[in-house]
Amino acid sequence: MAVITKASLEGKVVKKLDMQTELPKKRYTLLCMSEKFGISKGSKQPMITREWELIAPEKITIDGAEVLVAGTEFTQYLPLGGNANADKGLTAEQATANAVDRYLKEQAKLGLDGESVDTENPSLGAEGKVVEAICNSREVSPKEADGTPIYDPQTNKPLTRYQPNLQEILGLSQTKVNAAF
């Protein structure tokens, strides 16, 4: 086996988006890889979970470096019900109305029924759809099992990581995937 030095890799390695790199807020093309309906573990409300893959652009420049973003996968949670939230001044009925309104608007952007939803048995139709969307990153702080923040040993500050986030679906894309050209 040949010896490869770090210096010899300079300029050859294509950096892939990772949890230490913030995805810039911009327009991306996404593919819905899967969609399922279930009950949220946290709120105990009906919820649709969608798995998305970023397919375009393939690479972007972040802090002067070219970063491969195509292939990045992330999860979108779409509640169809809500719990009362005193901090936001919402009753359970208002929280549910807000959640359903968001879902119906998104369904219309996907070319699906945006007029009504059966919150106990919603129709699923996003899987396989390619959309244009605004994405960014959500900042997260890793915690130990007991909830204590995990600290960076060099800075002695809580670690900060980034998760890709689907902010808004703009509509269906003209981009075709898995199609003959």
Image (cartoon, rainbow, N blue to C red):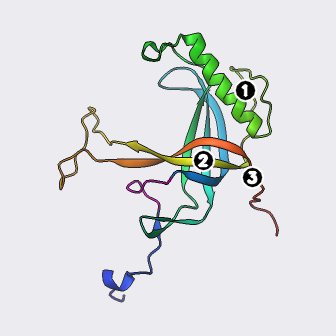
Q: Amino acid at mark 1?
A: Pro
Percent across and percent down for residue 68 are 52, 66
Q: Amino acid at mark 3?
A: Ser
Q: Nearer the viewer, mark 1 or mark 3?
A: 3
Disc 3 on helix, strand or loop? loop
Mark 1 and mark 3: Cα distance apart in space: 24 Å
Q: Which mark is residue 60?
A: none
Vertically, is 69 above or below 52?
Answer: below
Disc 2 on helix, strand or loop? strand
| Range of magenta residues | 17-24
Which of the 4 image quarters holds residue 2?
bottom left
Identity of the residue drawn at 41% across and 53% down? 19
Quadrant of the snapshot with the N terminus: bottom left
Percent across and percent down for residue 149 are 25, 39
Identity of the residue drawn at 66% across and 23% down? 100
Q: Is residue 23 magenta?
A: yes
Which of the 4 image quarters holds residue 110?
top right
Q: Amino acid at mark 2?
A: Ile
Which secondary structure dominates the residues rendered in magenta? loop
Q: Earlier in the sequence, mark 1 or mark 3?
A: 1
Q: Which mark is residue 173?
A: 3
Q: Earlier in the sequence, mark 1 or mark 2?
A: 1
Mark 1 and mark 2: Cα distance apart in space: 25 Å
Write down the residue under mark 2.
134
| Observer able to see residue 5 | no
For the residue pair 9 and 99, the one nearer the viewer reads as: 99
Residue at the bottom extreme of this rendering: 2
Disc 1 on helix, strand or loop? loop
